[in-house]
């Protein structure tokens, strides 16, 4: 089985288990948004996604912190995606950085891409799963991203057109 597929599946399992466990452990901080109407992405090679809701988890900027922080926010960030062969490119509008993910699934119903690479702080993994029939997708980033030796996690729920 492809390493990126395994990492993507494990990342999603960790998110689901973590949210399920901590949902009962914290105050009832929920954000509910209306589900957008169906948007067919189909076989486009270029599409834009709007982030509807974001969440992130970390231990703060220093390993000496004795807490785990979690934040859930309504969002309105926009992200252009482009498919080139077996690669999916994401460009961040805020800073212009471009990320390259390897496509592991691309059929009539779904697009899935993931990539793992080392950084100066530790490994980083990004995953993207899109339902082409509804336009709804999830983008995740996890890893050791600096300031702390503890892993961090971010997830965005997006609508793509």
Image (cartoon, rainbow, N blue to C red):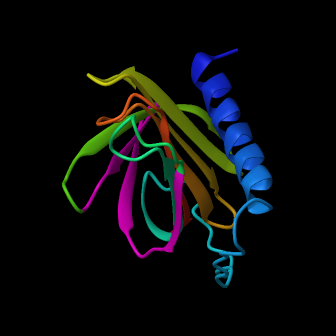
Q: Residue furthest bottom?
A: 34
Q: Residue placed at 26% from the left, 22% from the top? A: 120
What secondary structure predominates along the stretch shown in magenta? strand
Q: Is residue 76 magenta?
A: yes
Would residue 158 appear left or right of 95 to someone viewing this image?
A: right
| Image quadrant occupied by the N terminus | top right
Question: Can you say whether 93 is above or below 90 in the image?
Answer: below
Q: Is residue 123 visible?
A: yes
Q: Residue placed at 70% from the left, 64% from the top? A: 26
Q: Residue placed at 64% from the left, 82% from the top? A: 33
Would residue 61 appear left or right of 111 to someone viewing this image?
A: left
Question: Can you say whether 21 is above or below 47 in the image?
Answer: above
Task: Return the x and y of residue 79 as percentages of the image width and height.
Answer: 37, 61
Q: Is residue 155 visible?
A: no
Task: Return the x and y of residue 12 as percentages of the image width and height.
Answer: 68, 41
Who is closer to the viewer here, 66 or 105? 66
Question: Can you say whether 159 is above or below 142 in the image?
Answer: below
Q: Residue placed at 19% from the left, 53% from the top? A: 96
Q: Is residue 103 magenta?
A: no
Who is closer to the viewer here, 25 or 130? 25
Q: Residue furthest left?
A: 95
Would residue 75 appear left or right of 2 to someone viewing this image?
A: left
Task: Return the x and y of residue 58 as percentages of the image width and height.
Answer: 48, 46
Question: Can you say whether 102 is above or below 46 in the image?
Answer: above
The part of the chain drawn in magenta is: 69-93
Would residue 64 appear left or right of 137 to someone viewing this image?
A: left
Who is closer to the viewer here, 11 or 132? 11
Task: Return the x and y of residue 125 as percentages of the image width and height.
Answer: 48, 32
Q: How many marks?
A: 0
Q: Quadrant of residue 13?
A: top right
Who is closer to the viewer here, 28 or 156? 28
């Amino acid at each position: 089985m492809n390493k990126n597929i395994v990492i993507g599946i494990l990342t999603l399992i960790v998110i689901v288990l973590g949210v399920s466990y901590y949902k009962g452990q914290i105050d009832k901080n929920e954000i509910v948004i209306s589900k957008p109407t169906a948007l067919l992405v189909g076989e486009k090679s270029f599409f834009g996604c709007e982030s509807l809701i974001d969440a992130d988890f970390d231990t703060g900027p220093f390993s000496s912190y004795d807490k785990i922080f979690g934040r859930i926010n309504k969002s309105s960030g926009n992200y252009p995606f482009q498919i080139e062969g077996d690669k999916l490119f994401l460009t961040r509008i805020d800073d212009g950085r471009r990320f390259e993910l390897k496509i592991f699934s691309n059929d009539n119903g779904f697009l899935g891409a993931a990539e793992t690479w080392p950084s100066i702080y530790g490994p980083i993994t990004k995953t993207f799963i899109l339902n082409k029939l509804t336009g709804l997708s999830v983008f995740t980033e996890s890893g050791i991203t600096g300031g702390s030796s503890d892993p961090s996690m971010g997830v965005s729920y997006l609508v793509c057109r």
